[in-house]
Image: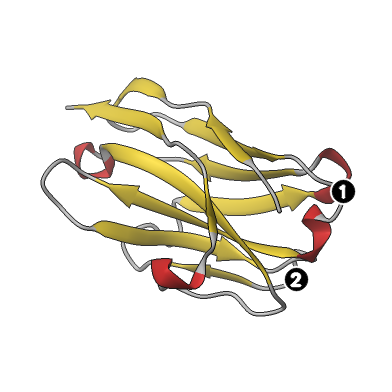
Amino acid sequence: QVQLVESGGGLVQAGGSLRLSCAASGRTFSSYAVGWFRQAPGKERDFVAAISRNGGLTDYADSVKGRFTISRDNAKNTVYLQMNSLKPEDTADYYCAAQQSVAISRDPVYYRYWGQGTQVTVSS
């Protein structure tokens, strides 16, 4: 079992940057694939990015490709989401999720463990 805690959200102007962190408990975090998802008010939870357990495979939603970068430091049990060139449409609650697996997925149903989320607001 793993527990996830997101941090790093906040208010930023359009064009700015934020780095989100997803800190995990447990000694086997390196065996978990991790995904980032976001949910805007009144909308469904959408896939943002995912990373394999060793960091060798990543995937991004088209809407963030080239602007966001997912990475991980297994020694620190942490996954990061570097968000650059932020747009107002990036405003949402951001969640990290983990699944003990080799594969990664864009489907939120795939991930068993979820954090509580961190809010990101991008002003125009």
Picture residue at 55% right of the left edge, 45% below the top: 81
- In the displayed structure, would residue 80 be above or below residue 50? above
Residue 58 percent location from the top left of the image: 61, 69
Q: Which numbered disc flags the more N-terminal residue, 1 or 2?
A: 1
Q: Is residue 114 visible?
A: yes
Residue 73 versus residue 65: which sits nearer the camera? 73
Residue 92: numbered disc: none
Picture residue at 45% right of the left edge, 36% below the top: 116
Picture residue at 45% right of the left edge, 40% below the top: 84
Element assignment for label 2: loop
Residue 17 percent location from the top left of the image: 45, 31
Element assignment for label 1: loop
Label 2: how many Cα within 10 Å (few below 14, some 14–19, many 20+):
few
Q: Which residue is mark 2?
A: 56
Q: Which residue is mark 1?
A: 27
Q: Quadrant of the C terminus?
A: top left
The answer to whether the residues at label 1 and label 2 have Cβ atoms under 8 Å apart is: no
- Distance from Cα at disc 1 to Cα at disc 2: 20 Å
Residue 120 versus residue 114: which sits nearer the camera? 114
